[in-house]
Amino acid sequence: MRQWRIYVLIVFVFLLGSGVIARLFFLQILQYDYYSVLAQDQQQFLQTLFPKRGEVFMQDLSSSQRSNEEHYFSLAVNKEFKQIYVVPRDIPNEEKEDLSNKLSYILDLDKETILSRINKLNDPYEPLKHKVDQEIVQQINDLNAEGVKLAFETWRHYPNNSLACHLTGFVGIVDEKKVGQYGLEGFYENELKGEQGLLKGEKDTSGYWIPSLKQKIEPAQDGANLILTIDQNIQFKAEKELRQVVEKWQAESGTIIIMEPQTGAIRAMANWPVFDPNEYGKVENIDIFLNSSIQKVYEPGSVFKPITMAAGLDSGYVSPDTIYIDEGQIRIKGSVISNVDGIAYNKQTMTQVLEKSLNTGAVFVQQKIGTDVFQDYVQRFDFDRPTGIDLIGEVGGNISNLYTGRAINLANISFGQGITVTPLGLITGLGAIANNGKLMRPFIIEKIIKPDGEEIITGHQTIRQVISSQTAENLTKMLVSVVDNGYGKPAQIKGYNVAGKTGTAQVPDFEKGGYSEDTIHTFVGYAPAFDPQFIILVKLDKPHGIRFASDSVSPVFKRIAEYLFNYLEIPPQ
């Protein structure tokens, strides 16, 4: 009996020892990482250091010219706001119901939402509302409620409200993080956001940081600042003119782009309708966030005819004085293509084709040069590719009808039907004519300034020579004649040569097939014609009560061009 008891004791000690050893193995080996982190969390102080987001600035070219110094104006900045939050563990249970009612009224929030956050026991922080105004701050102070706190926080702010909103985009919340969305905020997110830092040290039993030699600081790196090619005054003028013409003709939407043809620098890019990036959450239709200058395509219509003529002139198949017999319409395998006015003009030169915007003349040129040459020249202008501008979400056009092998498709494309482009793609292509035949990459960032002061200059970039300089000069003379003698007359400006072309395009009806009664009006022009300082595109979508682009958008071009002549101090010729 005595030996049996000893054996039991030995087994018990063995099992107990094995259990202790197993537990120690589990804690010290298998769970080492977990308890190590737990201990560090109790002993160490870790705090994320947030960087300052880079800011965005526009230029003032007139001031810079007068003073020979650079002048910048804020477009997107960082601004301190107040936020309301609660500390649930500090709020007495008997006061939660009444406090929820009061906060719901002051903050215009759902009472149940507030109550659910207040009831999170032992929670040191539950946000209720961000970016509150001073009136609400005062009401919260007057409330003097235990556990209801105010704190400063930094948010993105756009001091000009909707000005250039499609260029800036906005900073939104994604997975509880502030992230740039749309426009420059999205495209340059990595450059603007900077890099987070870290403060590491020891803390006492109450959880407070103990300053010591063991502390480690990894400073946050602020984001870079962006200097745009956009001029604030030109942008404001473009948006004002666009808003007025959209309202005048009750149009659905519109676009104005102003670019330097020699460099590709964008001086203004305006779209309508607009939104306020400070209150982007109030926008119901997110389609408004899209920059239609680069993210929406359309059939350009007759404003595409200079591209067809460029192919004819540069390939040597036609000259400005080449004559064809206009019979008012042309038949292609059962299909009929007519001039917009239905008139037969008999003998017409290629210059008169552009002046009168004759569809049959454009088809004549296309048929004269042949399929392969026409395809080659249209492709040279890169209408089917994004231009490469530094904005998020850019798309290319669609020129697939060039390659169907159908003669009617090629004929339609010659006067801008059956092919799609973006407004930026179109002005970039026509800008090559203004720039002695050189196609430029459009850009919107003049330079990037890093936190250490280093400046990265963007500079202009030539894509390719699409037509010869002689062809460009001859075509410019023809487009000047369009403004002097043709449908572009409303764009005439006394003392200056203006080159330009209108386009009144039908809108495809994808449900019924064919084209609807709606139209899109476009005018693209540059001046001074033989030393162009700017090229302007004005586009109006589905206007009412007006038939032709010459009457709707050409006058807008004239007003903007007159403003630019004065603003940029361009003397008459």
Image (spheres, helix red, strand yellow):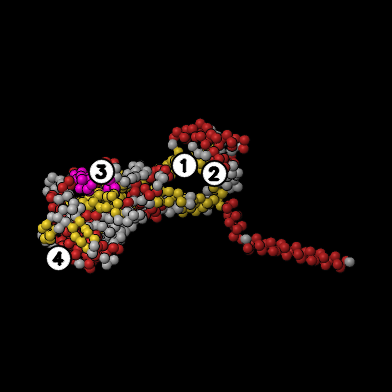
Q: Residues within 10 Å of mark 4 (few under 14, many from 20)?
A: few
- Which residue was labeled with disc 4? 316
In-front residue for pair 379/438 = 379
Q: Are marks 1 and 2 in contact (CB under 8 Å)?
A: no
Q: Is residue 50 left or right of residue 353?
A: right
Q: Amino acid at mark 3?
A: Gly
Q: Which sits earlier in the primary sequence, circle 1 or circle 2?
A: 2
**For the point 44% across and 35% down, which residue is it?**
134
The answer to whether residue 461 is magenta is: no
Q: Are marks 3 and 2 in contact (CB under 8 Å)?
A: no
Give me the C-alpha separation between circle 3 and circle 2: 58 Å
In-front residue for pair 115/42 = 115
Q: Amino acid at mark 1?
A: His
**For the point 51% across and 43% down, which residue is it?**
127
Q: Is residue 315 left or right of residue 217?
A: left
Give me the C-alpha separation between circle 3 and circle 4: 42 Å
Q: Residues within 10 Å of mark 1 (few under 14, many from 20)?
A: some
Residue 34 appears at what percent x and percent y? 60, 58
**For the point 76% across and 64% down, which residue is it?**
15
Residue 86 appears at what percent x and percent y? 54, 40
Instruction: Report if residue 206 is visible in the image.
Output: yes
Q: Which sits earlier in the primary sequence, circle 3 or circle 4?
A: 4
- Which residue was labeled with disc 1? 130
Q: Is residue 9 above or below residue 442?
A: below
Q: Is residue 359 left or right of residue 298?
A: left
The answer to whether residue 544 is magenta is: yes
Residue 125, which numbered label?
A: 2
Q: Which sits earlier in the primary sequence, circle 3 or circle 1?
A: 1
Q: Residue furthest right?
A: 1
Q: Amino acid at mark 4?
A: Gly
